[in-house]
Amino acid sequence: MSRPAADLTEQLGPFEPAPVPTEAELAALRAWMPTRRWFPVKSGSPAIDPWISVRFTDGSAPVIHLFLVGDGEPDTRTIVQVPVVRRPALLPPVEVGAPLPPGVIGEVDGEWLVDAVGEEELWRSWLALAQWGEQDAGPADVDLGNARLVTGEQSNTSILFPRAGGGAILKVFRAVVRGANPDVDVPRALVQAGWTGVPAPLAWLELSWPEERTGLLDLGVLSELVADAADGFELACAYAAEARSFETEAFELGRTIAEMHDALARAIPTSGQTVGIEWLRSELRHRARGSAAQAPVLSTRLPAIEALLSRLGTDVPADLLLSLQQIHGDLHLGQVLYSPTGWRVIDFEGEPMRPLEERRRPDLPVRDVAGMLRSFDYAAAVGECPDPTWVVACRAAFLDGYAAGQAEGAALAPTVPGLEAALRDALELDKALYEVVYEANNRPDWVAIPIAGVDRLLAAAAAPDPGDDVV
Ligand SMILES: Nc1ncnc2c1ncn2[C@@H]1O[C@H](COP(=O)(O)OP(=O)(O)O)[C@@H](O)[C@H]1O
Ligand SMILES: O=P(O)(O)O[C@H]1O[C@H](CO)[C@@H](O[C@H]2O[C@H](CO)[C@@H](O)[C@H](O)[C@H]2O)[C@H](O)[C@H]1O
């Protein structure tokens, strides 16, 4: 995956040094950051230390602070981005004693310290100084009218610009990964490979700070806005609530995901990497133990989980190899948009709770399939679907669509009877265990959803008749 070189003809990068936060600013930031949904460390009182502070070279007021969060060596701590700006007054003014709006960090020295991600001044500098893709016009004609922050359960912070060109969305990464962010490079590679199922990245903002030997850090990405798009999860929940058939949509989604896997294999070749069943089993076991250590509710289930994993692939040849490739890595209904032109796939950052080296590794495409199957379960639960057959039909339609969309000769696993379904079940269990930890950390009210999924998979695996397996 290559990037066009930054234009350095003006010998000036996008950033210049800025003062680190004052003591008073730091106190306000340390109190505010852990209250944000995007704050990546979910338990304890992690250390939050200023690391790098920069401002744009166009003279605008916002300062981008990068913090190192958590303990350990600087190289292993999480980098968190908070652009800030100080304002003498808030518009509209806040009543004395009233809660502060979410973007207001606190009152500092008689001024307001504000999260600049919601400020037009930051957007203008961002668009002017970002690195624009080869075919894109650049910022000259960008109309920021009707811009609005995307609200909801996000790991990052996004702003919609419906009037910028054909419409655009800016995602400001909150947890900044070291090295190129897959959410920039993977969709770019897919677009370059001619796949239209992904919104095209238009521009991205790179920071490289030699003094701190940062290497490349991607601070955000501007992408094509998918017009008239419905969030896949909200759509599926609405259908589930009425027990309205979602099979046509699920079939098309399956087909789109198969096409995505085919395009990923072409766009980002992985030189024939493979793993054996033993390796996979030990990785899944390691992850299951890690999940149980973080979510005590899983510990009583660990023996049954280990038993399921120990049976995985025992009836296949010991030298059987499974092909790896670039995958999405955190595929669920909230990562797909349903538009009048079909499904589009977003957010290629992988599972936010996984270490980045793992997220960048080639993986089994069946992991994405399993992730989506889990998501139908979530939609049925959150939509309080009155009909238990709804989710079964969605799963079957999605798998049928996936099979229909696969390139000739492609298969999720070598054609050993039962192996494909066994891998799917094992990876669905892996995802459900991840979700238990995710929900315990983020949405404890929802933790029963993945626990029910874990129990269903364990019960199906323990049942004497393999025909009892869920679809
Ligand atoms: N290209 C796009 N077009 C339209 N809406 C989008 C687009 N990308 C993201 N969104 C909306 O923004 C939300 C957050 O995007 P996502 O990439 O999942 O961010 P995060 O990493 O913060 O979870 C999505 O659920 C979707 O509603
Ligand atoms: O979208 P992210 O990359 O931030 O992914 C994380 O958060 C997701 C929730 O927002 C979480 O997904 C889980 O909840 C979804 C409904 O909100 C559901 O559709 C998914 O199936 C379920 O896994 C995801 O696991 C997490 O990594």
Image (cartoon, helix red, strand yellow):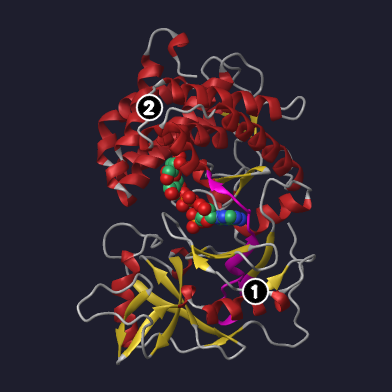
**Residue 171 circle label:** none
Q: Which amino acid does label 2 sit on?
A: Glu
Give the secondary structure at mark 2.
helix
Q: State the residue lying farthest toward the top.
A: 465
Q: Quadrant of the N terminus?
A: bottom right
Question: Which residue sits at x=72%, y=37%?
Answer: 262
Q: Which of marks 2 and 1 is nearer the N terminus?
A: 1
Nearer mark to the viewer, of 2 and 1? 1
**Label 2–label 1 contact, CB within 8 A:** no
Q: Which residue is drawn at 34% across and 35% down?
A: 449
Disc 1, ligand 1: is the CB inside 8 Å? no
10 Å neighbourhood of mark 2: few (<14), some, or many (≥20)? some
Question: Residue 392: x and y, percent?
Answer: 47, 22
Q: Which mark is residue 143?
A: 1
Residue 343 to residue 153: above or below: above
Q: In this view, does 176 lie above or below 189?
A: below
At 60% from the left edge and 40% from the top edge, which residue is drawn? Answer: 363
Q: Farthest residue toward the left? A: 97
Range drawn in magenta? 205-231
* Residue 329 vs residue 232, the one in the foreground: 232
The percent coordinates of residue 364 (x first, y second) are 60, 35
Magenta-colored stretch includes residue 222: yes
Rendered image quadrant of residue 397:
top right
| Residue 405 makes an appearance in the image | yes
Residue type (three-letter) at the residue carrying disc 1: Asp
Task: Please name the residue that numbered disc 2 is placed on.
Answer: 306
Give the alpha-carbon distance from disc 2 to disc 1, as whole Å: 56 Å
Left/right placement of residue 8 relative to residue 13 reads right
User: Picture coordinates of residue 402 (x, y %)?
Assistant: 64, 29
Between 332 and 327, the residue placed more toward the observer is 332
